[in-house]
Amino acid sequence: MSGQGQRTRSITREHAKHVREVLDGTRRGAVVHISNVPFSLRSFISGQARYMRERGLDLHIICSAGELLDRFAGTEGVAVHEVSIHRQITPFSDLAALWKIVGILRREQAVVVHAHTPKGGLLGMLGAWLARTPAALYFIHGLPFVTARSFRRFALLSSDKLACAVATEVLCVSDSIRGVLLDNKLCHPDKAKVLLQGSCNGVDADNLFNPARLDDAIRRETRARFGIGADSLVLGFVGRIARDKGVGELVEAWRLLSAEFPNLHMVVVGPFEVNDPIPPEAAEILRTDPRIHLTGYVHAEHTEELPAIYDVMDVLAFPSYREGFGMVSIEAGAMRVPVVTTRIPGCVDAVVDQETGVLVPPRDSQALANALRTYLCDPELRRRHGEASRERVLRDFRQEAIWEAIYTEYRRLLEHAAR
């Protein structure tokens, strides 16, 4: 299980024959995505199923059960295999999950395993190695060990190092995350790649996150739903309401800004995170301030709702402590909304400082408030940075380009395995 360069997977003659048939189009191939939580599947692979089917590949998902998994499967039309994959270290449950994963990969005759999240990556890569799956990609969307401490940090580092060692390729969601991965010697440089300009799935900036598709009536309706006046300023946040997302600092910045701007409202999109809770006093403010509007999680089948919410924002705040790429920053950018985010790995790839947004130090509520204030006071700056954001998204983060790059990696790895 060497971590040096790309591994050559030892596969059977029957496996090799199967791979060649997939490559020449005489047989369909199974790509199995593995994740421990269904929450992020929309960001990871939404839209990919149709694209891959047209190229002879069928997408399967191995994931913990839940309503969100059922919703996603119905929307995307993918095959689902429910396996309980816990986020915490649970040796007996993890071994049981690994055994089930190996059985599914063999039964479906998977040609590619594409795993996400630290636990999904570890079990997915080990499962692919045991099942002799020809190609095994570990997609690193972020590195939780960055903000972890003591034993949890050690466990996360060890998990990622082992997953990288048994993967045939490691895809990093951004250049800065690849840098952190290599700085910590978790993966050989020849094995770690970033596709195009980064991100895992790109953004549908033509049909979904496109402000030109939303008329004034939709804007008025969305504002009215939240009780926001036509002349009010709107600050937005999209993501898990969690400590690591910097929501505590966001609430502190809100306390400063809401006193200065009586017509300022804040729309917060996302669920409260029970495993990484924000301070109780911050949660109380979010729940009780009449000018703060909580939407909860926006379900996959209600995708039209999210662009409409972005469209009423004047500026997006995303003060995360740890991020892989910061997809909400480019979703907002596609909607011509400038972003104030943190100068950390991941976020620095999604926002160009002083061009499409502003980068501020993490855990600094005063710096966050100052940057947001600048935008709230300057509509021309908001317009200019918003336009630059959308132009960058259209140039660098189109979904079809990302999907083509992923498919090209699949073929390259399969061609290597079939030699």
Image (spheres, rainbow, N blue to C red):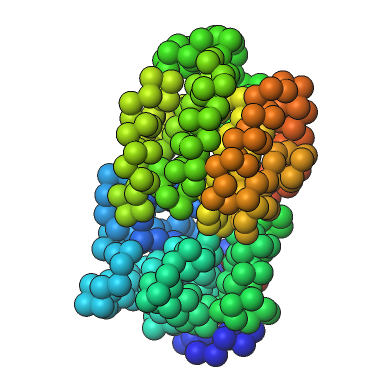
Q: x%, y% of residue 117?
A: 44, 63
Q: x%, y% of residue 155?
A: 40, 76
Residue sitting at x 61%, y 64% = 177
Determine whether 18 is above or below 47 in the image.
below
Q: x%, y% of residue 96?
A: 24, 75
Q: Of residues 265 and 18, which is closer to you in this image?
A: 265
Image quadrant where residue 370 sits: top right
Residue sitting at x 54%, y 50% = 363
Q: Would residue 255 be visible to someone looking at this image?
A: yes
Q: In this view, does 240 lie to the left or right of 92?
A: right
Q: Of residues 283 and 309, which is closer to you in this image?
A: 283
Q: Would residue 112 be visible to someone looking at this image?
A: no
Q: Of residues 222 and 151, which is closer to you in this image?
A: 151
Image quadrant where residue 20 sits: bottom right
Q: In this view, does 57 lie to the left or right of 361?
A: left
Quarter of the image where the C terminus is located: bottom right
Q: Of residues 33 and 269, which is closer to you in this image?
A: 269
Determine whether 228 is above or below 387 in the image.
above
